[in-house]
Amino acid sequence: MKIKSGFKMRSVGSDHIVIPEGKQLINFNKMAALNSSAAYLWEQVVDKEFTVEDLSRLLCEKYGIDEQLARTDAERLVTSLTEAGIIE
């Protein structure tokens, strides 16, 4: 899967928001708030193909959490971004 073109993450203080740009801006439903670990994942995979396993591995490496927790968190992020129409 991949983050669709036309979406950018913006950070204001400790808040991270994914917003549409250009033609995507017409649909304001395609926005998402990210916590710091989701923002980290976004930065690591933007403009790249990735899998849930890739995201899980990144979480394990960065935060030292167990694989099952990392996979659960990665799956939630993918579900959320897919439902918002941000990844394909």
Image: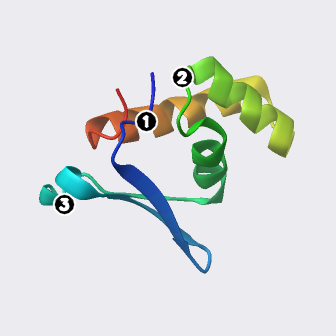
| Tag 3–tag 2 contact (CB < 8 Å) | no
Query: Which residue position is annotated with label 1?
Result: 3
Give me the residue at 82% from left, 45% from top: 63
| Tag 1–tag 3 contact (CB < 8 Å) | no
Q: Is residue 31 left or right of residue 37?
A: left
Give me the residue at 80% from left, 33% from top: 60
Numbered circles on residues, count: 3
Disc 2 is placed on an element classified as loop
The x and y percentages for residue 88 are 34, 26
Earlier sequence position, callout 3 versus callout 2: 3
Mark 2 residue type: Glu
What is the C-alpha distance between the residues marked 1 and 3? 17 Å
Q: Is residue 32 left or right of residue 34?
A: left
Query: Which residue position is annotated with label 3?
Result: 28
Earlier sequence position, callout 1 versus callout 2: 1
Disc 3 is placed on an element classified as loop
Mark 1 residue type: Ile
The x and y percentages for residue 38 are 58, 49
What is the C-alpha distance between the residues marked 3 and 2? 25 Å
Give me the residue at 56% from left, 29% from top: 48
In the rendered structure, find residue 49 and report the number of the disc placed on it: 2
In this rendered view, identify the residue nearer to me: 45 or 65. Answer: 45
